[in-house]
Amino acid sequence: MKWLDLNNPTSLILDQIIQKINEGVNVVDKDGNIIYVNKNSADYAEETIENMLGEHIAEFYPNAAVLKVLNSKKEYTNIHVQNPDGRHFIVSAYPLMIDGQVKGGLSIFRDITELKMMNSKISNLQEKLINTSSSNIFNDFIGSQGSLKEIVNKACKAMGSPGGPRHSIISGETGTGKTLLAKLMYRFAKNIGVLKEDAPFIHINCAQFTNPDIAASEIFGSKKGSFTGASNKNGLIEQANKGILFLDEAHALKSYQNLLLKVIEEQTVRRIGGVKEIPVDVIIIAASTKNLEKNLLPELYQRLAQYELVLPPFDQRSYSEKEKMFLHFKEEYKRS
């Protein structure tokens, strides 16, 4: 099977282009023998192009994805392949079709070994940073080293995610510490530098309003005349820009859940009755005593539940934790 006729000017140009690209390129016949290879691929294999031509691809790339193509006659895109020597590649492989028949295969790959090692180092450093930074902030959260240890770890990961803080859900019965956990997550995010020191923390109990329209105007803002008594007002989402909006009893949003979903997806907010889209960058922590998976739109729940923290009821806590909580509430009562 002839691949490129280098006496043909068009083929010569094509060859020069393929030889210059950053990815490795291998072309094999239907038996897996190499009929074309570029310099990048030869360099990865620590061979010359001349020595590779005519040889079976498996001699240089034992886990070659192009061999799967020859067997399945299907294309494979962006798959991860690890060589026996420990190197990692992202590979796309395609069948070569001529007159409706598979005559060979083409693979294009790039070496991501250094990138993978760098990501691993970043993850390890991030884990150390989270462990170091969380040790003091969550100490006062009763159970942080006991029954709530995994929840605290998860809360730290939500705020310390490599891509930035993540939206989260906190669920649990009344009095289990949902508000305190949200505030500690906020403090932790500032402590590790993913939120600025002056970043806002805005808290609203969505169930405190008997009229959901009023709750919506508080959260999203309103334009004068949009409903009886409405005034021009920026909502809590705007006030929480560059920080955290804590929506307690988020299930009470009811018919305005679509607006919240739009804020998350588009990172803009439109005041009730308004037409202007206002850019916002806000992390939402939604809390509830109810099951938000059953009380929120599926799309909204999926967006918010990137990290879901479920606080256990009081009767599931250890005796020592119950004792500490009792003494804590006793002192709080004395100060009130």
Image: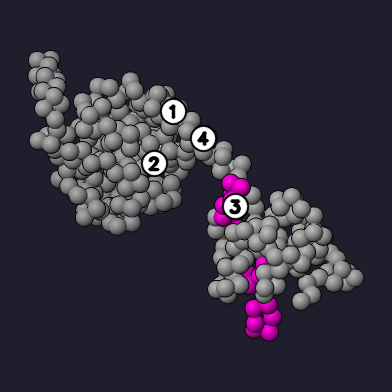
Which callout, 4 or 1, points at the residue further toward the start of the chain? 4
Q: Which residue is mark 4?
A: 122
In magenta stretch: residue 96:
yes
At mark 3, the secondary structure is loop
| Front disc: 3 or 4 | 3
Residue type pointed to by label 4:
Ile
Q: Which residue is mark 1?
A: 128
| Front disc: 3 or 1 | 3
- The answer to whether mark 2 and mark 3 are in CB contact below 8 A is no
At mark 4, the secondary structure is helix
In magenta stretch: residue 201:
no
| Front disc: 1 or 2 | 1
- Could you tell me how many numbered marks the image carries? 4
Q: Is residue 18 above or below residue 115?
A: below
Circle 4 packing at 10 Å, graded few (<14), some (14-19), many (20+), is few
- The answer to whether mark 2 and mark 4 are in CB contact below 8 A is no
- Residues rendered magenta in the picture: 81-106
Report how far apart the C-alphas of labels 1 and 2 lie in the structure: 19 Å
Report how far apart the C-alphas of labels 2 and 4 lie in the structure: 18 Å
Position in image of residue 229 (x %, y %):
24, 44
Q: Single out the residue that lies furthest toward the top.
A: 335
Q: Which residue is mark 3?
A: 83
Residue 237 occupies which quadrant of the picture?
top left
Q: Is residue 57 above or below residue 310?
A: below
Q: Is residue 277 left or right of residue 154?
A: right
